[in-house]
């Protein structure tokens, strides 16, 4: 007879444990789905940021190349110009030759 009383208790405990496990499984499934959604969202944001950074980098490279070219032309142009010291020397020489 004690076995008959014990059996329903075991069944009730097993059913309770099974429901607890099912609930834990459901909660874990929801968490995994949320983590997956967050991962996808973060990936998309990082990808967008990376694309913007690439565009900015390319633009900066182009601007840098243009500035280098401009500085090169400017330095080539200024090589042919007389310096202030050279002009002062010429002015003194002319002053010596043509005193006032």
Image (cartoon, rainbow, N blue to C red):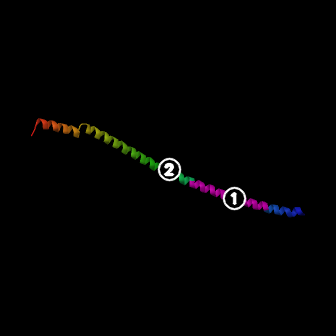
Asked if residue 35 lies in the magenta stretch, the reply is yes
Label 2: how many Cα within 10 Å (few below 14, some 14–19, many 20+)? few
Q: Which residue is mark 2?
A: 47
Label 1: how many Cα within 10 Å (few below 14, some 14–19, many 20+)? few
Q: Is residue 67 left or right of residue 86?
A: right
Q: Quadrant of residue 30?
A: bottom right
Residue at 69 percent of width and 57 percent of height: 25
Quadrant of the image containing the C terminus: top left
Residue 36: % across, % down? 59, 54
Q: Is residue 59 left or right of residue 23?
A: left
Residue 38: % across, % down? 57, 55
Q: Could you say which is closer to the camera, residue 72 or residue 23?
A: 72
Q: Is residue 22 visible?
A: yes
Identify the magenta region: 13-38
Q: Is residue 31 left or right of residue 2?
A: left
Disc on res. 99: none
Disc on res. 24: 1
Q: Could you say which is closer to the camera, residue 96 or residue 30?
A: 96
Asked if residue 4 lies in the magenta stretch, the reply is no
Residue at 42 percent of width and 46 percent of height: 57
Residue 45: % across, % down? 51, 53
Classify mark 2: helix, strand or loop. helix
């Amino acid at each position: 007879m004690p076995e008959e009383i014990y059996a329903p208790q075991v069944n009730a405990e097993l059913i309770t444990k099974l429901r607890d496990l099912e609930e834990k499984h459901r909660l874990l499934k929801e968490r995994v789905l949320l983590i997956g959604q967050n991962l996808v969202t973060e990936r998309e944001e990082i990808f967008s940021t990376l694309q913007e950074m690439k565009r900015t980098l390319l633009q900066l490279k182009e601007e840098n190349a243009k500035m280098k070219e401009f500085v090169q032309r400017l330095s080539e142009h200024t090589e042919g110009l007389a310096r202030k010291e050279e002009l002062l020397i010429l002015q003194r020489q002319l002053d010596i030759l043509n005193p006032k």
